[in-house]
Image (spheres, coloured by chain):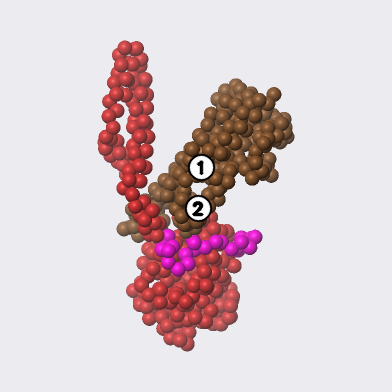
Amino acid sequence: MARKTKVSRESDAVLDISIFNDVGRFLQGRLGLSPAVEWYVGKTAKSIEYAVREVRNVDSWRMSAADSVVNVERNLKTVFGDFGRGVHFLNSSRLDWGFELLETQITRGFAQFLNAGTDRWLRVDRCVRLANALDRFGSGQSVTFREALAEAKDAYCATEYGDNAGRIDLLILFFPNLARKRPSAAIAMECKMNADLGAGQLRKYDQMFRKKKLREAGNSGLDIDLPPWIEKYLVARSRDSIGSKHKIGSDWTVVPWGSLFASYEICRGDEGAEIFTSGHLNSDGDFARFMRTVFETGGGKFS
Amino acid sequence: MSITLPETLVKYYGDEAWHGSIESLLEAKPDKFPEHLKWEEQLHYHEAFLAAEVTRFDYHKAMWNLWQFCWGDGYRKIEKVVGEPKAKWDTFKELAPNAVWDEGLWREYSQDSDTAKYAMLGVDIGNDHLRVAIYVSAGGRKDTMDEHALRAILEGIPENTYEVFEDETVYLTHPSCRLGLKKDDGKAEFDVSELAEICTGVLDRLAKLK
């Protein structure tokens, strides 16, 4: 594909470079220089032609975008979400506490913001929005899972749920009732920032999820029923940071932190999101600063 | 004698989200496509990516203009301080796009020896300043600023136009070069005549040093 692109770029040439070829022929004919010199002159001509084209490209980009700021802003918002709406993490400064957040602090902080205190609707909104954000990574969430989200009356983000075999960092449960019993769907997130993935770590979680009950170690310590369907994600600095030595099953989707937050912000624009977030801007501001901090901790990259 | 910053830089300095987006796009690898985006969003990403590159180019171009106004071919005078080079001045490795973006536009004038005197000229544009920098080493194993050069640089220039950093690099500016872009007045033109005059004076005084 790359070669094809290069060829078509050259065949589109609109500049007259024949003068350089003429110079090459002159040098060869009159001065008796070798074909290598002619080749060199021809190559130089190509380089000049390419450089001029690149400069023209920049200028034509500018001209085609006479309304450039509006145009660029539209594209930036497609990539990062609408930073003109509410409090966007890129519009927020990172928390300057003089140290980098550890993985456990990141996961517990994330859970705290997703749970949104006592505000049940905001909690459901944030958890569903996160599910939507994760769905953009092509994990192929099932119809049953999506239906469960649509009918969720409450949600809860648990930390370190598991048993002696292992504890998953985040388990987001969606309930079809207010009693917070028998969740109808769940999202499992293993979060990596600096630590490496343990040997067979994800496989142990897969075995753990076959059980019907799990205990939360981090917060309440309560047993909870597991739903029949769990969507599984591995969040990391980048896909490359996981390393090739780990075999990741096809039912786990790798999600970079930066892309996750960009995707989350894109999903803020989803229908209905405004209803839930209005009146909670301060809380969103704290969440945005937290996201910005984690984003920067992960290197400020989104891919 | 003025420098006009293009809209790309005005937005970059004036809008925090825009700033964060551009920084993030410049960190993105060209061989990767963000996994959270959809097939139909590909051109939006590529145009955003291009906008980030254009912003970086505009930044470099603005600094080049500042260099031309303030330092110009000042190296001819610098040569009188550090001696004519035996070979080409430098390898221009500090001109890599990301180096200029991260560090500003610098040029080092040095002989091919670790202990010889050397000098550095630079320009820098930030979110609240537009300034130039100069450093002249005393030579020898200990890398310190040449005292005579420092006196010559600071001689007769107003106090509010210079700052000597911890590493002894002298930064020169002028009140007319304070950006203040966060004001929503869309102004992005800066008069650099006074700063250019200061720079000319600095180079002239250095050239007279024995």
Tell which of A153 and A166 is nearer to you. A153
Decide if residue B98 is in sight here: no
Residue at 55% across / 33% down in the picture?
B71
Residue A81 belongs to magenta span: yes
Q: Which residues are magenta?
A: A79-102
Instruction: Check disc 2 and give the amino acid type.
Output: Leu
| Residue annotated with mark 2 | B181
Residue A237: where, in percent of width, then height? Answer: 51, 58
Dot 1 amino acid type: Asp
What's the colour of chain A in the image? red
Q: Colour of chain B?
A: brown
Instruction: Give the SS element for disc 2.
Output: loop
| Residue A144: quadrant of the picture | bottom left
- As for residue A244 lying within the magenta part, the answer is no
Tell which of A108 and B178 is nearer to you: B178
Quadrant assignment for the C terminus of chain B: top right
Mark 2 is surrounded, within 10 Å at the Cα level, by few (under 14), some (14 to 19) or many (20 or more) other residues, namely: many
Count numbered badges in the picture. Answer: 2
